[in-house]
Amino acid sequence: MNYEIKGLPERTAKPRNSGLTMVMDKGLSLRQVKDFIEVGAGYTDLVKLGWATSYVTPNLDAKLKLYKEAGLPVYFGGTLFEAMIVRGQFDDYCRILDKYQMEYAEVSDGSITIEHDEKCEYIRKLSKLTTVISEVGSKDVQKIFAPYKWIKLMSAEIEAGSWKVIAEARESGNVGIYRDSGEVRQGLVDEILTQIPEETIIWEAPQKAQQVWFIKLIGANVSLGNIAPADIIPLETLRLGIRSDTFEHFLK
C-alpha cells in the first residue's frame, strides 16, 4: 500500500483460499489486458474468459501468455463446457483444456438441462485433470430453485470434487441468487450459509450494491465473482472500508 491507514480489516494474502476476486474478461484486447494487469493483478485471483468468448477471441494464445506471466490463473467460462457437452464433445473439451494448459475448468448447467448425477460425474472426471470450479443456478430468470435444492446441489458438487462452487448471477446480476431487479434473495443466501461452508462459495456479484451487501454480511474476505476489470480497484476499497458504502461498517 502507498501509506498507512490504521484499523482496516485484514485481507487474506495471495494465493488465497478465501476472499477471492474473480474478474470477468468479456473480450479485452491485448492492450486492455496489459492495462488491467498494471493496476489490478495484485487484487485479482482468477480471470474468467466469459461464457465461450475464448472461441472467438483474437490472439488467444498471446492473451493467455500475458495473464500467465502476471501470475493470474485463467479459465474458460462454463458455457463453453455446456456448448461442447450438448454436442457430445467432452473429449474434445478435455483436449482444449490440455492444449491451453488450463489450471481450472468450470462445470455448469445454466444453459442446458442435464441430470445432476451426470454433471457430478463430469466434475469427478475433470477433477482428475485440473481444478474444478462448478456453478449452481440457472441463467433462465424463470427458473427459481428452492433453498434446499441449492444446498443439495452445492453439497453434491463439492463432494464430487469441486474446489469452489459459484452461485449463479450471470454477468448482469439479475438471475440465480438475485431477483430480476438485482436485489439479493436474502433468505436464500441465509439458508445456503447454514449448510455450505462460506469459504467454498464464490458469489457472483457484478453490481456494486451486491458487492456491498455480501461484504457487510460475510466480511472483507468474502469471495466474489464476475467483477468487471474496471471495478477491481473500487471493489478492493469496498473490502477495506475506505469507500462510503462500507465506511462505517468497518469502523471500530
Image: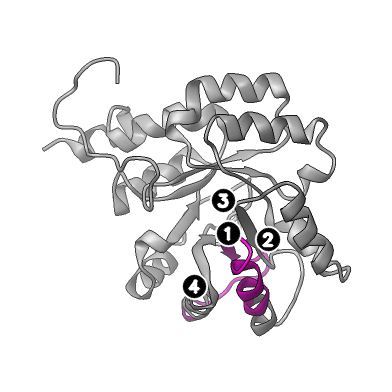
Residue 158 shows which numbered tag? 4
Verify CB contact (< 8 Å) between mark 4 and mark 2. no
Verify CB contact (< 8 Å) between mark 2 and mark 1. yes
In 3D space, how far apart are the residues under numbered discs 2 and 1 (Cα atoms)?
Answer: 7 Å
Q: Which residue is mark 2?
A: 139
Q: Which residue is mark 3?
A: 181
Comes first in the chain, label 4 or label 1: 4
Q: Secondary structure at mark 4?
A: helix
Q: Which residue is mark 1?
A: 168
**Kind of residue at badge 4:** Ile
Q: Residue at x 58, y 64 (%)?
A: 134
Residue 149 shows which numbered tag? none
Question: Farthest residue in the top direction?
Answer: 2
Between disc 2 and disc 3, the foreground one is: 2
Comes first in the chain, label 2 or label 1: 2
In 3D space, how far apart are the residues under numbered discs 4 and 1 (Cα atoms)?
Answer: 16 Å
Q: Secondary structure at mark 2?
A: loop
Whole-percent x, y for residue 44 in the image: 48, 36
Q: Secondary structure at mark 3?
A: loop
Quarter of the image containing the N terminus? Answer: top left
Q: Residue at x 65, y 81 (%)?
A: 116
**Kind of residue at badge 1:** Glu
Comes first in the chain, label 3 or label 4: 4
Between disc 4 and disc 1, the foreground one is: 4
Q: Start and end of the magenta stretch?
A: 120-148
Relative to 76, residue 124 above or below: below
Comes first in the chain, label 3 or label 1: 1
